[in-house]
Structure formats: structure tokens, C-alpha cells
Amino acid sequence: MSKQVFSFHYTLKDGQGNTIDTSSGSEPLAFLEGSGQIIPGLEKKVIQMAPGEKAKVEVKSEEAYGQRQDNLVVKVAKKQFPENGDNLNIGDLFQLNEDRHSPPFEVKAFEGDDVIMDGNHPLAGVDLFFDIELVSKREATESELSHGHAHGGDGHSHDH
């Protein structure tokens, strides 16, 4: 079965109506159907749309970045960091293990000689509200299918 590449513009807001992210003023976001490039709850809606169609989509946290996980909040001794943690700042991001696919952990707080790190996605546990407009949909190219992701508007650009 063939797969489609969808390109759409979006504005993402939280439950209070604050804009979190938008594609306005830049290229539309392109994704290969079924590739995991966008959150499942949004993909479900986008693939049902026709080019030019606009929609408001509410995506519950379970179909976005999941619920917050308490086990992803950890305490790490400052001495485990470069320069004994002297140059750490709230918001700094670190890989805490060798797996480059594991989530980055963010410095959240300091407690004495320890650093509180959080590996939850910043939008975990948050319901998301999208205003979307489907710009185009087309058949995926062989290259996109073999690489497992969209290559931009016409399907021919690739960096590697």
C-alpha cells in the first residue's frame, strides 16, 4: 500500500490559549504517513483532510507526548557534571546515558550538592490545541519510503 506525504501549516496552543509553536511565516511541516514524525493524535486528523481544508484539533496528552512520569525526575550529584556542576543553569539539557535516542534531561533545580533533572518532554501531560491547514498531500517517493521520513515539499531534498 502506498503512503502519502502531507504538508500542513499549524499553530499549537495550550489550554490557556498561549501559542507554543507555529509554522506561520515559514515552510509548512511535511511528514510521511505512519513514520512517527508527528504526534499520533494530530496525524490521525491530518490524514483525513483535503488540501486547503482547515481544522481545529484537540489532542489529549495520551496521544501527544504522554503523561508525565515521576521516574524521569532524578537527582544527580553536581560532581557528576563537567566542572563539578559549577556552570550549570536551570534549563540546560543533558543526555544522561549513552543511548542517543533517550530523552534529554533538563536541569530543573538545585538542592545542595545535587541537581534535579527532568527527562519528561516539556509538553508531557499537556493537552494540545492545533489550528491546522493542509497545504498538500502527495505520494511518497521511493527515497522517502526507504529513509522513513519526508524530504520536504517536492520529496527531493536530502542532507545525507
Image: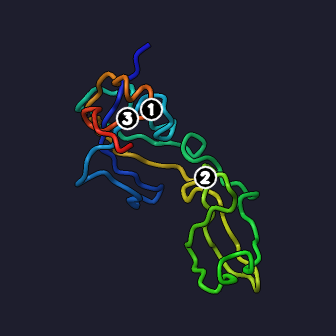
Q: Report, in whole angstroms, how far the alpha carbon at label 1 lies from the one at label 2.
A: 19 Å
The mark that comes first in sequence, 3 or 2, is 2
How far across and how far down the image is residue 112, in percent? 76, 86
Cα distance in 3D space between marks 3 and 1: 8 Å
Amino acid type shown at disc 3: Ala
Disc 1 element = helix
Q: Which mark is residue 100?
A: 2
| Residue for point 37% across, 27% down | 143
| Type of amino acid under label 2 | Arg
Earlier in the chain: of badge 1 and badge 2, it is 2
Between 102 and 134, the one nearer to me in the picture: 102
Q: Secondary structure at mark 3?
A: loop
Q: Using the image, tell me which numbered label, if any, was put on residue 85.
A: none
Residue type of the residue flagged with mark 1:
His
Task: Pinpoint residue 68: horizontal percent, then vertical percent.
Answer: 66, 54
Q: Is residue 70 left or right of residue 55?
A: right
Q: Quadrant of the N terminus?
A: top left
Question: Is mark 3 in CB contact (under 8 Å) with mark 2?
Answer: no
Few, some or many C-alpha atoms within 10 Å of disc 2 (few <14, some 14-19, many ≥20)?
Answer: few
What residue is rendered at 39% in x and 29% in y? 144
For mark 2, give the secondary structure.
loop
Rendered position, 138 above or below 59: above
Q: Which mark is residue 147?
A: 1
Give left or right: position of 75 versus 139.
Answer: right
